[in-house]
Image (spheres, rainbow, N blue to C red):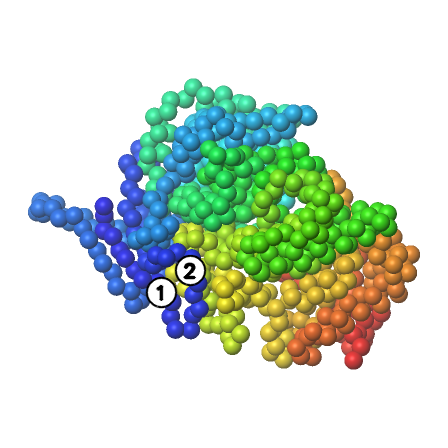
Amino acid sequence: MSATAVMDPSGHVGHISHRTDEASVDIVAVDTVGSESSEDDSVGERDEGATTPDEPSVTLDSAPEVQSQKTEAPRHSSPTVVPPVLSLWTSQCDGEVKLRMSATGLASEQPVTVSQLLGRAVQRYGDQAALAWKEGEQWSKMSYREYHQQCRTIAKSFLKLGLERWHGVGILGFNSAEWFIANIAAILAGGLAVGIYTTNSPEACQYVAENCRANIIVVENHKQLQKVLQVQDKLPHLKAIIQYRDTLKEKRPNLFTWAELVEMGRNEPDNRLDEIIASQKPSQCCSLIYTSGTTGQPKGVMLSHDNITWTALIAAETVRLNDGTVSQEEIVSYLPLSHIAAQMIDIWLTMRIGGVAYFAQPDALKGSLVVTLREVRPTAFMGVPRVWEKMQENMKSVAAKSSTVRRRVAVWAKGVGLQTNLGRMQSNGSVSGRPLNYLLARQLVFRKVRKALGLDRCTRCYTGAAPIARDTLEFFLSLDIPVYELYGMSECSGPHTISLPDAFRLTSCGKVIKGCETKIMTPDSEGSGEICFWGRHIFMGYLNMPEKMGEALDAEGWLRSGDLGKHDAEGFLYITGRIKELIITAGGENIPPVPVEDAVKEAMPLISNAMLIGDKRKFLSMLLTIKCQMNMETGAPEDELTPDALDLCQKLGSPATRVSEIAGGRDRAVNAAIQEAINSANEHATSNAQRIQKWVVLEHDFSIPGGELGPTMKLKRPEVLKMYKEQIENFYNEVVTAETPLAPN
């Protein structure tokens, strides 16, 4: 072993800290040296992990440092070799970081590489299914043994195409076996796996490919290929493009099909690949997750082998999923794999437990997801808030068309379900005995609902990546479907807190995962402050952006989330806002927008999106959109109202069937109902400064292709401010118009 440094990152006075591991979270730097690679690095040689002039070290100022070294007789003929001092972070792709290990507990688990994780899966689950995809009407499957072999074959192909160490392999396409395999193959071959959002413009693709020095880009189809071809001349490191679906419409130099790629590596010798794999260390970078850029230029989040493999282990331990040797968990892969939540769950967590990943259709988020869910009947399911909201809307629409008797039974059952599950929640999942009315409701309603959704075998339903409304959580809870929240970010490899059946509170994102720690920085009188993370899941750094690390880590190395939150007496974490989203009015009042927006949407179900305005302004205003149909092909909003929106308009006495008949205050009945909802939200305001004074209904809903929403349906506030600048400025002009009603005094 090389020098071992032990540092104590205990919290200061003024911090509230929560941990789940009985062990201390002292850092133990572990020497994870592999054999030297025979490959020449693509950048100049440097001391791996050493601090460079533009890379200030994040240190623990008052922490003692203990070093132990092997004792040997000195060789006076040669200088003493001093091991490189590793930092908690680096911005260099070929850098190495100190692992945040503890002496005991889960944070002391032996670090492993991605190759070792995959090898473990082959040994334990070899002939069991790993991946499944639809071919016509049948599901085809690939075993873990075949999966492993395919990853190695493609890795050898990448090397033959000229993939250099620490260079990117960009993957641009919908979830598929090829996406998984290309991702892992890039890592095995010593490159960096880089997901690119399918919604990216050619210019956005260029930025990512340029930033990671991509040697190879793997695309799904002709549409995605065109994006790369448009910017190919601006990518000096690019050597090859692979299209994994559909036939090539034209043959070009260095453009290959997936079949050609497989054939290319099939008979390549193993020794070069094996040397690279043997040289890899858990403390080195293997994957880049690019932030969606909702608040600026995307940043390349560098994740190490240990970040990925340890987080997969801890997530599996925390959620208590079945091991594949006992019973295989089955999940549906449909969320963008460029996002850490989907990648961690679909690829790494599933591999860790020996589960099966079924691939949904590319139009999953446009309507086909429920069809796949009914076919697969997953045992665990992750949905971003918008997915759960869409399910809720569709179910309400179906219920509205039911007979009076069916509606009454459903209302009764939902009342029983909500009370029973709230009671179970308060008693931390313990059930002394199920009431007869609950058993009857389950037989008459709950089982049928679960079956209709394809969730009849699902024991874990999760949500994350964006805030979810309490109304949606209560809706599913009333149907005996608890939706558990998890919370994290790309910079912590995915999850940091998770709700569980026996540790669950509505609107809380749960408790910290095992082996990690949370502290609330400079809490206010109510215990709310910035949420900070500690654990082996904390990222290595931002690629080529050392200047951003001061914002990301505090002086002790804690990850600053940028979110405001607090713990209750039982250790449940509640998010109260986001620092960058915090509205500070001209009068100096701090207002988190999400609770206000949720209150308006809850009071008026016709509203699909609400965005609070008021930063540096004299009063608050709001942009609103109406629930409408979405184009199944493009995902763009259409003018026609959704069935539940139509139903609500009829109840309000409005003849409106289109958004254009409501937008801009054109429908008096709807206008009055929205104003009532605004008034309702204003009644709960703690001061006049927190009252919404003006609002407007926009001409169309927010969407991904429209630019208002990110790939995971998260609101891109800076973009919306730019796009609707004219409407916003109208709020703050002297004249009050019919389009921007003033709330009554």
Question: Quarter holding the C terminus?
Answer: bottom right
Q: In the image, 661: left or right of 453?
A: right
Determine if residue 211 is in view: no
Q: Residue at x 77, y 72 (%)?
A: 679
- Tell me the residue that label 2 is attached to: 19
- Tell me the residue that label 1 is attached to: 10
Q: Which one is in front in this view, the residue at disc 1 or the one at disc 2?
A: 2
Of 424 and 496, the residue lying toward us: 424
Of 240 and 322, the residue lying toward us: 322
Of 652 and 479, the residue lying toward us: 479
Mark 2 crowd level (few <14, some 14–19, many ≥20, 10 Å Cα): many
**The furthest residue to the top:** 267
Give the vertical position of 19 relative to 710 (above or below). below
Q: Residue at x 86, y 50 (%)?
A: 404
The image shows residue 335 at horizontal and vertical percentages of 60, 43
Amino acid type shown at disc 1: Ser
Determine if residue 12 is in view: yes
Question: Which element carries disc 1, helix, strand or loop?
Answer: loop
Give the vertical position of 226 relative to 86 (above or below). above
The image shows residue 205 at horizontal and vertical percentages of 57, 44
Q: Which of the 4 image quarters holds residue 612?
A: bottom right
Q: Earlier in the sequence, mark 1 or mark 2?
A: 1
Q: In the image, 201: left or right of 500?
A: right
Q: Residue at x 63, y 37 (%)?
A: 377
